[in-house]
Amino acid sequence: MGTESNPPCQEHPLPPFSMPTTVVNMDKTDVFDVRIDRATKWGNPYKRGRDGTREEVIRMYRFLLDAYPDMKKEAKRELRNKVLG
C-alpha cells in the first residue's frame, strides 16, 4: 500500500496478484469495471439457442479468440484483474 509520499494507484490500489478477474451478473449489480455483454467488443457473438448449446457457443467463442491472437492478447491485457459485468 502507499504512504503519504507514495500514494497507491487509484485505479489498482492493491497489487494485481491480489485481484483476480471476476465476472458478476449485471442483472444483480451495477458495480463492475468493464462491461462484457454482446453490445461490447468483448461480448460473445454466438447466442445460446440460435447458435448452439451453452457449451457449444462458449467453445465457438474460444475458437474465435484463438483464431485472432492479437484480440486474445488485448482481452488479457484489458480484462485482467477487473470485475467484469
Image (cartoon, rainbow, N blue to C red):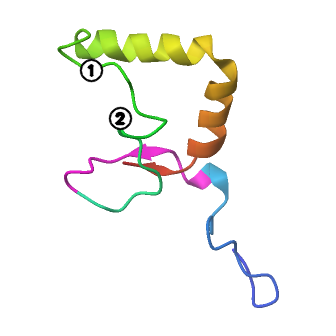
User: In the rendered picture of this protein, how many numbered marks are placed on residues?
Assistant: 2
The overriding secondary structure of the stretch rendered in magenta is: loop
User: Where on the picture, by quarter, is residue 76?
Assistant: top right
Residues at badges 2 and 1 in contact (C-beta under 8 Å)? yes
Q: Nearer the viewer, residue 18 or 56?
A: 56
The residue that appears at 41% across and 48% down in the rendered structure is 35
Q: Which residues are magenta?
A: 18-28
The residue that appears at 70% across and 75% down in the rendered structure is 8
> Mark 1 highlights which residue?
47
Say whether residue 7 is magenta: no
- For badge 1, the amino acid type reads Lys
Q: Nearer the viewer, residue 8 or 78?
A: 78
Q: Is residue 58 above or below residue 42?
A: above
Marks 2 and 1, the one that precedes in the sequence: 2
Q: Is residue 7 above or below residue 26?
A: below
Does residue 58 appear in the picture of this structure? yes
Say whether residue 19 is magenta: yes
> Mark 2 highlights which residue?
38
The image shows residue 24 at horizontal and vertical percentages of: 32, 48
- For badge 2, the amino acid type reads Arg
Q: Nearer the viewer, residue 64 or 21?
A: 64
Q: Quadrant of the N terminus?
A: bottom right
Left or right of 50, for residue 30: right
Left or right of 8, for residue 52: left
